[in-house]
Image: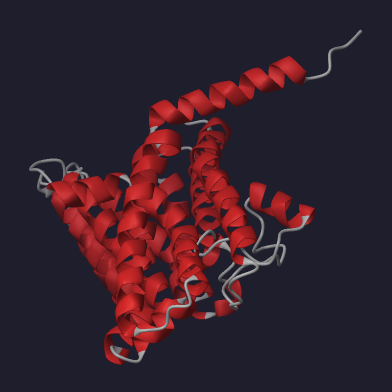
Amino acid sequence: MPLIDAFRAIAALFILLHHFVSYFPMSDTVWDEFPVTFEWFCDYGSMAVQVFLVIGGFLAARTLSAPNMSPLPLIWKRYVRLVVPYLAAICLSILTVLVAGPWLIHWAIPERPTGSQLMAHVFLLQNILGFDSLSAGVWYVAIDFQLFAATAILLWIGRGRIIGPTLVLIVAVASLFCFNLNDEWDDLAVYFFGSYGLGAAAWWASNRERNPIWLVLIPVVAASAMAVEFRGRLVIALAIALTLGISRRTGCLECGTCFKPLAFLGKISYSLFLVHFPILLLTNVFYAMLGLSSLVSAMVGLLLAFISSIGFAALFHHSIESPAAHRRITCLVSSLFVKFRPTAR
């Protein structure tokens, strides 16, 4: 799906720039020279998360639409798929924090983790249990897993082509008109379920066997929610959902090719999302170690951090996230578990 690759790539770059302008001394130095640009990315760059939410709902509806779907194996598969690269990135972040400790003091640098904090991250419960995140953006991994699991369970409860999707859409509407209006819910999937549900609705409504009126209802519901309280993030979610739905219905979603750099970035977008923060932190550590403070050195440092993040993300994807690497890692862990597990006498 070239269009989805392109959306992922652009959204990943916006999130990358959002973090690059928001954290550490190099961004503080450059901010004074480009205040309008940096402030815009700081305030609005994070809205690119809506792209991943909608795409996640769109693809989840595709995956979970099979008849007689059993949710637990699919939820476990999703957990393993997310957590293997996620935990590798957490370990990288912890090592980077240990290196940064003597050289850089900044509010965005995580504290050294406790055992309870690590276990909370393993089970994707850190925000629910009130622990600080060990890297920027990892909250989204927990939310993505919650959203997928909730959708799988709702569709399984419905057990049908009508009741299951109806349950998902009811929760999505409740999110748009209620939960998403209160930031106290932002540690739970229900806060984000509206955008995720727009993606799922786009998949179901784009089926050519269905009346096109269902695709028209998506902007009607979203516009009604924005009439209650306008949210710019919902404008982005609606635009992505409609684009995906119309593209699939017209047959354009899977045709054509994506601009090669965008296709590449879309392919490694999850790895880029996971590793860019420790790379940015490490670059700022070297910046502090060298005692640099000029505008030129800060701009060069940010550019190097940007290029290094993409390069390391490509390596990370090949070594850890890709399906082949993922299978090797899970097989290794399984064999070690079998080898060292206690045996009954």
Q: Position of residue 16 (x, y in %)?
A: 36, 65
Q: Residue at x 39, y 59 (%)?
A: 53
Task: Determine which quarter of the picture holds residue 114.
Answer: bottom right
Q: Residue at x 49, y 48 (%)?
A: 148
Kindly give the residue lying farthest to the top in the view shown: 345
| Of 320 and 11, the residue lying toward us | 320
- Give the position of the C terminus as an image quadrant: top right
| Of 342 and 167, the residue lying toward us | 342
Q: Is residue 5 left or right of residue 120?
A: left
| Of 219 and 166, the residue lying toward us | 219
Can residue 36 be seen from the camera position used here? yes
Q: Residue at x 23, y 67 (%)?
A: 239
Q: Is residue 197 above or below residue 326?
A: below
Q: Is residue 162 left or right of residue 36?
A: right
Q: Residue at x 83, y 18 (%)?
A: 342
Q: How many marks?
A: 0
| Of 75 and 312, the residue lying toward us | 312
Q: Position of residue 332 (x, y in %)?
A: 58, 22
Q: Position of residue 8 (x, y in %)?
A: 29, 55
